Amino acid sequence: MLRVLLCPPTYFDVVDQKNPYMACPGPAEGARESAVDQVRARSQWEILCSVLQQHGCEVETIDPVEGLEDMVFAANQVFAGAKNGYGKFVVPSRMVYPSRQREVPFYADWCRARDYQLIELDYGDDYLEGHGDLLWHPDGSRIYGGYGFRSTLGGVEKFSAAMSKMGVPVVPLHLIDPYCYHLDTCLCPLNNDAALIFPGAYSAEALASLHKFWKRVHLLTVDEAHRFMGNGIVVNGSYITPYVTPQLEAILHEEQLTPVLVDTSEFEKAGGSCFCMKTFLP
Ligand code: ARG
């Protein structure tokens, strides 16, 4: 059974601008009402959990912490994996924003209590934002590492050095579109041969390496990418996505996936959607 970790959106809010989607700060700025509809956010999150359960996932949750407004984005705090001979492990992140840095120990403790080996990196001045920027190839043969907005090239290189000890190569990918500040907004592995990408998010070199590693590269339009259609969750023959277009539907059909719509409008105000809200646990 697939296990997946999420965090309830109890303290979720938009209080500052960490990415271009977060244009209207909430109460921390003063007079204005929060941009987030808390009731709607809670119900969208619950629907995401139940859709994951309907797809055969066992949903685990971590307790939300007051003051950590982005803790609901459970993809970022640790990178999780498993490798023969090493067992299950997590690499705690070093987040760029201080409020997000404070989320990491809670996730690391949660994983430590469940017998994950913690691989702590010495980040120095570098950053690395978990599954926001680090994506497994579905067969576990390599990891793609986005950098440029959040994770730094140095962070990806330090991660790469740690993974090379396990024999897993890391492919660095330079991101250049601020609306695709995390790799999970512009690369979505669909199966071992096919991925969805938004080409405008990558440097020429990064784009060339993506074409090298995937037999079928399906291109999202800028509108699809900026509406998080590349931030879906592939699970048991479905593609959980906030929106779908006829062209995305055709791609999914070709790859034998069925779109399943889950409204994430409240979370999109913070620059995240389905994929950002969970981590698959090995
Ligand atoms: N507001 C959050 C941030 O800017 C959103 C994180 C989205 N997460 C992701 N995996 N793309 O950090």
Image (cartoon, rainbow, N blue to C red):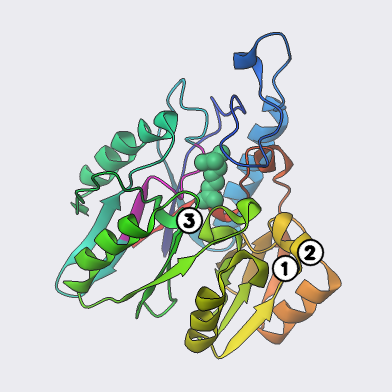
Q: Amino acid at mark 2?
A: Val
The quarter of the picture where the N terminus appears is bottom left
- Residue receiving disc 3: 148
Please tell me which of labels 2 and 3 falls first in the chain.
Answer: 3
Relative to residue 182, is residue 247 drawn left or right?
right
Task: Identify which residue is drawn at 65% across, 61% down.
Answer: 240
Relative to residue 115, is residue 107 drawn left or right?
right
Alpha carbon distance from label 3 to label 1:
30 Å
Q: Amino acid at mark 1?
A: Pro
Q: Secondary structure at mark 3?
A: loop
Residue 13, x across and y down, in percent: 60, 27
Alpha carbon distance from label 2 to label 3:
28 Å
Dot in front, 2 or 1: 2
Alpha carbon distance from label 2 to label 1:
7 Å
Residue 223, x across and y down, in percent: 79, 60
Task: Identify which residue is drawn at 30% across, 76% down.
Answer: 169
- Residue receiving disc 2: 244
Q: Main secondary structure of the magenta part?
A: loop
239 inside magenta stretch: no
Please tell me which of labels 3 and 1 falls first in the chain.
Answer: 3
Q: Amino acid at mark 3?
A: Gly
Dot in front, 2 or 3: 3
Task: Identify which residue is drawn at 66% across, 24% down.
Answer: 25
The quarter of the picture where the C terminus appears is bottom left
In the displayed structure, 276 sits above or below 22; it is below
Q: Which residues are magenta?
A: 72-80
Q: Secondary structure at mark 2?
A: loop
Please tell me which of labels 2 and 1 falls first in the chain.
Answer: 2
**Does residue 175 show up?**
yes
- Residue receiving disc 1: 259
Check contact, mark 2 vs mark 1: CB within 8 A: yes
